[in-house]
Image: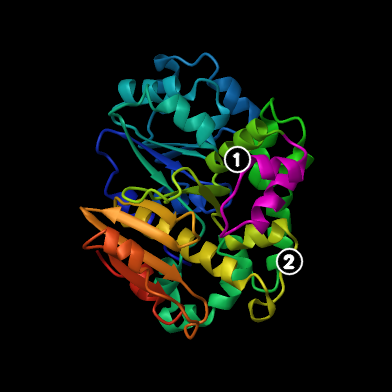
Amino acid sequence: MVHRFLEKIIKDRINTGKAIVLMGARQVGKTTLLKELFGWSGDSLWLNGDELDVQNLFENISSTRLKYICAGKKYLIIDEAQRIKDIGIKLKLVVDQLPDIQLIATGSSSFDLANEINEPLTGRKWEYKMYPLSFGEMVAHHGLMEEKRLIPHRLVYGYYPDVSNNPGREKEILKQLSDSYLYKDILMWEQIKKPEKLMKLLQAIAYQVGNQVSYSELGQMCQLDSKTVEKYVLLLEQCYVIFRLGSFSRNLRNELKSSKKIYFYDNGIRNAVIADFSFAENRSDIGALWENFIISERKKRLEYGLLWRNSWFWRTTDQKEIDYIEEGDGAIDSFEFKYNPLAKYKSPKLFLDNYPGSSFTLVTPDNIENFLLQKE
């Protein structure tokens, strides 16, 4: 079994008097991780917010009823908590009235869960994001050399646990995920009345990976107005399907200031959306696949390493660009991503001259471990 990096982090937060909130897309392994930590023993009470009787239970719950329900338990685990109405108030009730119970809640859509818990649970929670398996977790599982050999496979099929654990069934599993399961929370939301347009938008975004995107252009492709596109993009981001990267701008007049790129949290989902699982060696979009892979993996590295960084891309009006910029602890670091280690590239002189002290690094499959594993 692949051990998740969040396991130790969550263990260290148990019995600290605060709720533990675990956010992440469906099927990334949240429940599996919690089973490893808390099991199905008599000490744990498991409730699933997707189930109607659990939703009804919490409709008018009181502290007295909660104490009877949780009698003799050390842990209360509520899966898919975003499906329970006014969940933030209910979680606060547990934390305040049952101090001897460790509360753990999971959610697959931050637009419901995070919005509802932030105010009621201010100062009362530890919140973490969980992603599909990471490069670092797989290296810890079976070694660096083995995982580097599998990079072409990961570029096509990604890291969802069920995908990684079932070689030969990747396409079937990814099809099920991309058809509807990942978007369950969005499609159930009352304002999403045209799911086919949502899928068209995802396909348009998939073909734009690595490029700047325009909401108006995406809207023209999908027959949606730009405001609807922006709303759908935000919802997809809040369900951990995609994420945005903004443009870095400080010193130069010709730096793009409000541009954005959109990436998928998982390469397998991106490829499932466009129904292209051809081998990495034969693909014309290998550069986009590599860029999506490396940036999404870096995002996991920062989250699990509890590293605080701001992230951007950089581009000027005369087409000078850098794939990825990070700023943290007063330092600015720039990175270029090339799948072919022998590909030609130019050091970004304009950027380095205008941001003294900044660094530049080329990241390829040959030195990927320095970018994704190195302790900082």
Task: State the extent of the magenta-drawn residues as a range.
Answer: 199-224
Along the line of sight, which residue is nearer the eye, 239 or 89?
239
User: Residue 54 at what x, y percent from top left?
Assistant: 58, 27
On screen, residue 301 versus residue 209, left or right, reads: left
Query: Which secondary structure type mostly characterizes the magenta part of the structure?
Result: helix
Marking on residue 279: none
Using the rendered view, name the quadrant where residue 125 is placed: top left
Q: Is residue 4 visible?
A: no
The question of residue 223 being in magenta is answered with yes
Kindly identify which residue carries mark 1. 233
Q: Residue at x 54, y 69 (%)?
A: 290
Marking on residue 276: 2
Q: Residue at x 35, y 51 (%)?
A: 252
Q: Residue at x 44, y 49 (%)?
A: 247
The kind of residue on which mark 2 rests is: Asp
Q: Are marks 2 and 1 in contact (CB under 8 Å)?
A: no
User: Residue 323 at what x, y percent from top left?
Assistant: 45, 62
Q: Quadrant of the C terminus?
A: bottom left
> For the residue carrying disc 2, how many other residues have a C-alpha within 10 Å: few (<14), some (14-19), or many (20+)?
some
On screen, residue 223 versus residue 209, left or right, reads: right
Question: How many marks on residues?
Answer: 2
* SS category of the residue bearing label 2: loop
> For the residue carrying disc 1, how many other residues have a C-alpha within 10 Å: few (<14), some (14-19), or many (20+)?
many
Cα–Cα gap, marks 2 and 1: 22 Å
Using the rendered view, name the quadrant where residue 267 is placed: bottom right
Q: Is residue 173 visible?
A: yes
User: Residue 12 at what x, y percent from top left?
Assistant: 26, 49
